[in-house]
Image (spheres, rainbow, N blue to C red):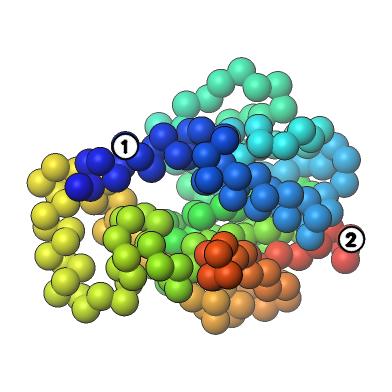
Amino acid sequence: MQLLLRRVTERAYSNKDSIVGTWRTRRFKDFLELVKPPSGAKIIDLGGTPYMWELVPHDFEVTLVNLPGTVRPHGHHQIRFIEADATNLKDVFSDQSFDVVFSNSVIEHVGDDNKQADFAQEVYRLGKAYWVQTPSDRWPIEPHTGFPFYWQLPEFARQHLKRSWKKKLPVWTEMVEGTRVISRKQMQALFPDGKLYIERAFLLEKSYVIYRPFEQI
């Protein structure tokens, strides 16, 4: 079942016309409307991929930061690729190097509470405005596992599922094991000056975003 789910998920995420592509295009438009990055803005995307930046035409200078081997660079003239740890970029970029810091579904993957706090501090250090999105634990289908209400299951049930998944999908299961969902309250504590935006689909809470508009600066 999980093998089939992974194939369907990969196809949905790679197809811009799929429902996932439609949702992400809408999310990108929300980013443009709420953060209001200026024309030609220098934007750093922590943990992102080129996919998001090809959904809507723009003239931004985008720098993608990922761990080594995570994303394969390609020859897009508006995108620069950097291999580094997004929780500690002090040796890579100086303070306030960018107009906007962007992050889509990444903070839940960087590690424990301390790592998530380090990530938040880098967001503040690197840019003037920011947009940090993470999936909601209230969405019925947990996006990383595809399992309904995964985080509401008791611990022993989650451990049982992971043991069964690891037999056929060890790398993917390792990703699931390293995922730490973060609540709205925790996000607001990490970004106390940020505004909260709730992304909804079918009237349900799909994800939430903490952001600081460029126009406020």
Q: Residue at 40% x, 56% y: name it.
A: 143
Local SS, label 1 = helix
Amino acid type at circle 1 is: Arg
Q: Who is closer to the viewer here, 151 or 104?
A: 151
- The residue to which callout 2 is attached is 215
Q: Who is closer to the viewer here, 202 or 40?
A: 202
Question: Dot 1, crowdedness within 10 Å: few (<14), some or many (≥20)?
Answer: few
Q: Residue at 29% x, 45% y: name it.
A: 5
Q: Give the percent coordinates (x, y) of residue 17.
A: 57, 35
* Residue 75 falls left or right of residue 146: right
* Residue 87 falls left or right of residue 142: right
Q: Which mark is residue 26?
A: none
Cα distance in 3D space between marks 1 and 2: 41 Å
Q: Residue at 48% x, 47% y: name it.
A: 85
Amino acid type at circle 2 is: Glu
Say which quadrant the C terminus sits in: bottom right
Q: Residue at 58% x, 70% y: name it.
A: 203
If you read the primary sequence from the N terminus, does the residue marked by circle 1 or circle 2 appear first?
1
Q: Which mark is residue 7?
A: 1
Q: Give the percent coordinates (x, y) of residue 178.
A: 32, 58
Query: Can residue 92 be spotted in the picture?
Result: no
* Residue 134 falls left or right of residue 100: left
Q: In this rendering, is residue 151 above or below 12?
A: below
